[in-house]
Amino acid sequence: MAEIQFETKPATAFDLFAGLETTNHEQIVFCQDNATGLKAIIAIHNTVLGPGLGGTRMWYYKSEKDAIKDALRLSRGMTYKASVAGLNLGGAKAVIIGDPTTQKSEALMRKFGRFVNNLNGKYITAEDVGTTTKDMEYVNMETEHVVGLPEIMGGGGDPSPVTAYGTYMGIKASAKKAYGSDSLSGKSAAVMGIGKVGWHLLEYLHEEGVRLYIADINENTLKAASDKFGAIPVSSEDMLSLEVDIFAPCALGGILNETTIPKLKCQIIAGAANNQLEDEVIHGDLIKSMGIVYAPDFVINSGGLINVYSEYNGYVREIAMSQTENIYNTILDINKMADTLNVNNQIAAIKHAEKRINDMMLVKSTY
Ligand code: NAD
């Protein structure tokens, strides 16, 4: 059986089928309903490992082209995240075009649920930016193919503590690579974004005796984290040039780019934010050339996905946590692979994910 060929970057020119050929997407579903105003795109990237799981993002996209591109980019990321986490899951993502604050309704979410249901389990949805647990309860009224439900409905609840634990494990593995020991005691860390994940990450780091610097646009959060963990607040701008062991981006994507990377004076970049590198090749290579150990975002933050996947076998948080702990070994493997292949860590992580998919294609070639 021929190997699946993956490109490291989606096509930039907008030519839908050419783009799908480049990224090797399996299926795109356009969902449209006049009565509820639903306009959604479900992008299923790859289902070799299992059904495609990925959240539903609702966003006021400037153009339909932007919405499609986002769905393609995010669904591809889910394929890699699931593969590298060792889950029997493929990659998919849905986007609903519209303003989540004014255009969302029970009817719209339930209609969307019906479209999800029509895919008979090939796509499993969950909440994402612009959608909430409540929205997923509406989706769940029309389909069982939804995860990330509240604990009282048999779901795993808030995945953030699990994501934070995986991030902590990834930081420890990165320290092992950078310093030869995974002890963080006496090290310093700068955490950008003290939200749901960042807060729990501070708990782990504080517990291990890490000297902490924090940045957030929310002054109340900064004060609370400073009081509780003795962390030193700095501006996001100043944080970039701090001389620290670890920089942990836990806010927005795109934080690692040609402007920010040259300012960094850390040994390790390891945080939970999605899509940290503006360009996986150019900026991944730049970080490597500076001798900084980078923990690929979709590996280190996969605890959240592991958590929702656990719902499928009857949710037990301890099981989700113990599977998440394995992020430590995966990060070590990726560092080794990057050294062997002489590529940056993000590219090594992608190759790691692709290898598992291609290996499993061989397993599935007979009944
Ligand atoms: P969140 O919204 O709870 O927290 C984000 C925090 O970042 C907020 O406190 C916000 O004020 C702060 N922030 C925003 N802009 C900032 C800036 N310019 N400088 C400094 N701080 C800024 O989100 P979260 O759930 O903690 O997720 C954090 C990141 O991790 C996101 O990129 C998310 O996609 C990713 N992630 C989260 C999970 C999860 O389980 N929650 C799983 C995988 C990935």
Image: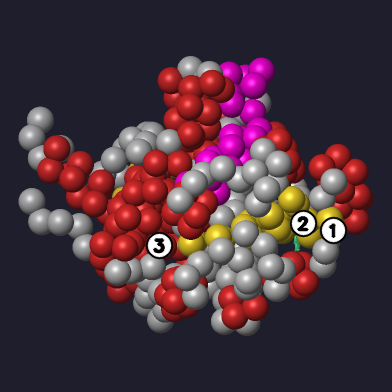
Q: Callout 2: helix, strand or loop?
A: strand
Label at residue 213: 2
Q: Quadrant of residue 82?
A: top left
* SS type, badge 1: strand
Residue 358 vertical position relative to residue 73 in the rendered view, above or below: above
Mark 2, Cα crowd under 10 Å, few <14 / some 14-19 / many 20+, is: many
Quadrant in the picture for residue 317: top right
Q: Nearer the viewer, mark 2 or mark 3?
A: 2
Q: CA distance from mark 2 to mark 3?
A: 25 Å
Q: Is residue 50 left or right of residue 298?
A: left
Going by the numbered disc 3, the residue's amino acid type is Asn
Q: Which mark is residue 233?
A: 1
Residue linked to disc 3: 345
Mark 2 residue type: Tyr
Q: CA distance from mark 1 to mark 2?
A: 6 Å
Whether 356 is drawn above or below 2: the answer is: above
Main SS type for the magenta part? helix
Magenta-tinted stretch: 151-174
Q: Residues within 10 Å of mark 3 (few under 14, many from 20)?
A: many
- Residue 155 visible, this orientation: yes
What residue sits 20% from the left and 57% below the top?
4
Nearest to the observer: residue 113 or residue 184: 184
Secondary structure of the residue carrying tag 3 is helix
Mark 1: few/some/many CA within 10 Å (<14, 14-19, 20+) = many
Of pointers 1 and 2, the one earlier in the residue sequence: 2
- Taking depth in this image into account, of 113 and 313 the one nearest to the observer is 313
- Mark 1–mark 2 contact, CB under 8 Å? yes
Q: Which residue is rendered at x = 55% and y = 60% of the image?
A: 268
The percent coordinates of residue 115 (x first, y second) are 48, 42
